[in-house]
Amino acid sequence: MYGVHRNNVGRAMSPRPEAAIHATDLRMSYGTTRVLEGIDLDVRPGEVFAMLGPNGAGKTTTISILTTLLRPTHGSATIAGFDVAREPRRVREVISLTGQFAAVDSKLTGRENLLLMARLHHLPRRSVRGRADELLERFDLVAAADRLVGTYSGGMRRRLDLAISLVARPQVLFLDEPTTGLDPRSRQTVWDLVREVADDGTTTFLTTQYLEEADRLADRIAVIDEGRVVAEGTASQLKSGLGEAFVELVLADATQTRIPTDGSIEHVGEVLANIRRQGLDVQRWQVREPTLDEVFLALTGHRAAPTTDVIAGARR
Amino acid sequence: MSATNLALRDTSTMIGRSVRRSTREIDTLLLSILLPVMVMALFVYVFGGAITPEGGYVDYVVPGVILLCAGYGAAQTAVAVAGDMAEGIVDRFRTLPILPSSVLVGHVVASLARNTVSTVCVVGVAYAVGFRPTAGSLEWLAAAGVVLLFVLGFSWLSVCVGLVAGSAESASGFTFFVLFLPYVSSAFVPTETMPRALHAFAEHQPVTPVIETLRGLLMGTPNDAAWLAVAWCAGLAVVGAVGAAVLFGRRGRAR
Ligand SMILES: Nc1ncnc2c1ncn2[C@@H]1O[C@H](COP(=O)(O)OP(=O)(O)O)[C@@H](O)[C@H]1O
Ligand SMILES: [Mg+2]
């Protein structure tokens, strides 16, 4: 993932690549409401970094600060070495933001949206049309190119939104909940596209409420809850914090039991032999690793998904 | 390219965007033409006979109708701006390396273009129903300048309204307020005929001096309010533009 960057001539010469995103002790308060309580971030060039957290955790606030939309109450951040507070214009030259809600002009056609953004990014006049065509092709929007965006489906809007973000080949791409509200098929398409963009070497910072999404897309994950990073690492590192694996038993009376194991045949065999000796009435059993959902639950004390049953039932 | 050149390029890109959007909203444009035409028909044919039985009321009322049209048209800017703010596209504009206020300038210039079209239409219809101004070409030019300045002032004011409105629906309430302003001015009846409170309001609101100036230019009626009219419009434009820049520049949006 390192050093595949197209837009970074200067970086190739420096001995140690500087962070694509660096944030120190970001805090944000609205009046007495503390929304961010000291966020530190370090994202390497070319990395895909996911900020995973439930609704209201402070993801959009963090992205707004990093993209120069919001001034933090405390702390500082740099993007590709530029300070977001002191050099917002330089930052804006290297970033692109796909916000939580599709930021497209619904009174223009898809093509017009792309042309508009290409012009505002000061692309050479000659290449504006070509770039738009290229992106329409890549994001499978050719057939809908000359229709008003107001008539697009949610998935199409998202794809256009992403395409618009890529018009100027940003160094750092910010995606705020890129698949929230999409049907499973559109979600898969967006995942594939994000993957592609990342494989081109674009540093990508995305937020999500979905553990699966973070797992699939990100090289590294920061779990954020109530304005704090509660854990950080690769998906497997986060999982290993809960123990490698366990034997999970469901007994006849529907109670569940978990017995930690290193996953080796010897140890699992021993565990199963023990169960036989105790004469437990086992309905089902399996050996498995913890899911990211369980990781999240263990880290934050509550579930990640914003569904009502979870909110009602999971705070302990 | 120099910074000024870039700023000009960004602004003209944004003007192009807003004008294009206006052409997609033909219904809004039609309404802002049809509405004053209907008001004109109402006053000329329905009330006109009662107001001045000997006729000639059309010459009195047309300047007011022109401003009714221009005011309503300018106020549509509030709806356009509020819609933009609600759509989230503005956040994208704010993360671009462009002059932030260029999107607002785009809206205002598009408003000037829209209102030029609708004003020309309204004047055409006025001619058809018997409007016979005495203005020479110089007066016509000055009258056009006054209308454009009025549109400029009200458009910038509308931008501010659009920025604080929160949604296109609440911004459209403002267009009705502006639509009613001419009724409490010298547009349709002389202000002396109004009850005292209304009279005071009518005498001191911007529409009255602008209408008197327009009437003076088009019909040659005596008018001493020209500077007041210019001051009102220019003042609204400056205060509106500065206010809009401040409102737009405010970071940390409400959600
Ligand atoms: N302008 C604001 N004024 C007050 N509170 C806000 C404002 N914006 C966001 N918040 C609060 O900050 C918290 C974090 O919001 P946000 O960053 O949008 O969370 P997320 O994107 O993770 O869902 C929420 O509790 C939200 O209500
Ligand atoms: Mg959010």
Image: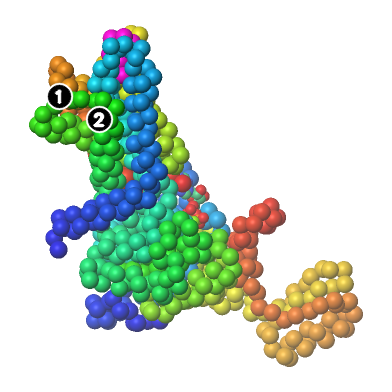
Q: Is residue B192 magenta?
A: yes
Query: Of callouts 1 and 2, which one flags the residue occurring earlier in the amino acid sequence?
Result: 2
Q: Nearer the viewer, residue A312 or B80?
A: B80
At label 2, counting other C-alpha atoms closer than 10 Å, the crowd grade (few under 14, some 14-19, many 20 or more) is some
Q: Chain of mark 2?
A: B
Residue B230 x/y as whole percent = 17, 28
Residue A121 x/y as whole percent = 27, 64
Q: Could you tell me if residue A130 is visible in this image?
A: yes
| Element at label 1 | loop
Q: Could you tell me if residue A24 is visible in this image?
A: no
| Disc 1 Cβ-to-ligand 1 distance below 8 Å | no
Residue A151 x/y as whole percent = 48, 58
Three-letter code, disc 1: Thr
Q: Which residue is mark 1?
A: B134
Residue B236 x/y as whole percent = 24, 32
Residue at 36% over, 61% down: A113
Q: Is residue A191 magenta?
A: no
Q: Nearer the viewer, residue A74 or A141?
A: A141
Tell me which corner region of the image, top left, top right, bottom left or bottom right, holds residue B196.
top left
Three-letter code, disc 2: Tyr
| A10 relative to A60, above or below | below
Tell me which corner region of the image, top left, top right, bottom left or bottom right, holds residue A14.
bottom left
Magenta range is B188-194
Q: Which residue is mark 2?
A: B127
Q: Quadrant of the N terminus of chain B?
A: bottom left
